[in-house]
Image (cartoon, rainbow, N blue to C red):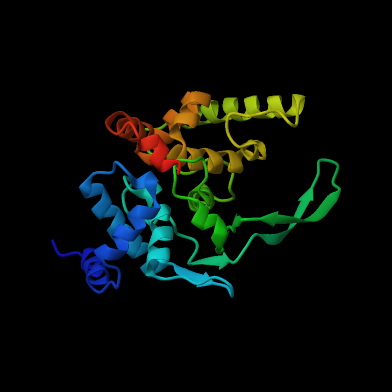
Amino acid sequence: MWSFRAWRRRRILSRSLYTTRHWHEVRARLPILDGLSEAEEQRLFQRAILFLHHKRLTALPGVELDESDRLTLAAQAELPLLHLAELDWYQGFHEIVLYPDDFVSPQRHRDASGIEHEWDDERSGEAWHQGPVIMAWPGVQSGGGWDAYNLVIHELSHKLDMLNGDANGLPPLHRDMRIGDWASAMQAAYDEMNAALDANPEAHTAIDPYAAENPAEFFAVTSEYFFSAPDLLQQAFPAVYQQLVGFYRQDPLTRLQRLLAEHPDYRDTTNG
């Protein structure tokens, strides 16, 4: 049966300016894509092209982007969706604004006693509900390795979280997932981190302590680790890791373990 959506998709891909040469450059920049099958890589390449067709990348003065830069960002954005049906997961925003460096974001919070606090917070990324995603370009460039940091995945996981409304750490789960199982795994790990930091604010935590900021940041940080340091996340919070396997329909740890087993020098080459 003829499908307008499929026809439009093919038309966008056929007219794309992005080539296999650009993709090879992207692959060299993103070790976290190592171990994907040929079919997965092709799907990711196409979805990255479609992402760039539907989302506008606005580079502020001081940021210069070429085709490979744009495709590198898009590939990281689409990696979490690689095994999810194409259901417009990144709806609700049309633009990514790229700053030349970290930026100041005005913050406001009303505490339990009703007192409102205002302050300026320096950030490398921010996702607005029903608004754009903002990222510092150096932060985007620093991601892509198996090193527990990926600004693109972190900020766009907030957009997945916001599909249910305000970000609260609960994205729309699949039918075969139970909210109770998700909440139990996430809450237990979140409480464990907060208890450790309450006892000692300088405590060394298994994952970035920013995850303990609130449930939305916990989901964003654990999503970031899921793709960029799955071994650390699984060791620290195995139940959380399994919930993310169920949500993203991927198992990056198995892919990383296979790479390490098949290529003994892989750890050294990926860590630079």
In the rendered image of this protein, does residue 161 appear above or below residue 193? below
Q: Quadrant of residue 256?
A: top left
- Residue 120: x and y in percent read 77, 57
Count the marks: 0
In the rendered image of this protein, does residue 61 appear above or below residue 115? below
The answer to whether residue 63 is left or right of residue 230 is: right
Is there any visible trace of residue 101 in the rendered image?
yes
Specify the farthest residue to the left. Answer: 1
- What residue do we see at 48% from left, 67% from top? 94
Is there any visible trace of residue 251 in the rendered image?
no
- What residue do we see at 44% from left, 34% from top? 230
| 141 vs 115, nearest the viewer | 141
Position of the N terminus by quadrant? bottom left
| 94 vs 48, nearest the viewer | 48
The answer to whether residue 143 is left or right of residue 5 is: right
- Residue 197: x and y in percent read 71, 29
In the rendered image of this protein, does residue 178 appear above or below residue 106? above
- Residue 124: x and y in percent read 62, 56
Position of the C terminus by quadrant? top left
| 212 vs 168, nearest the viewer | 212
- Residue 163: x and y in percent read 49, 51
| 116 vs 81, nearest the viewer | 81
- What residue do we see at 28% from left, 71% from top? 16
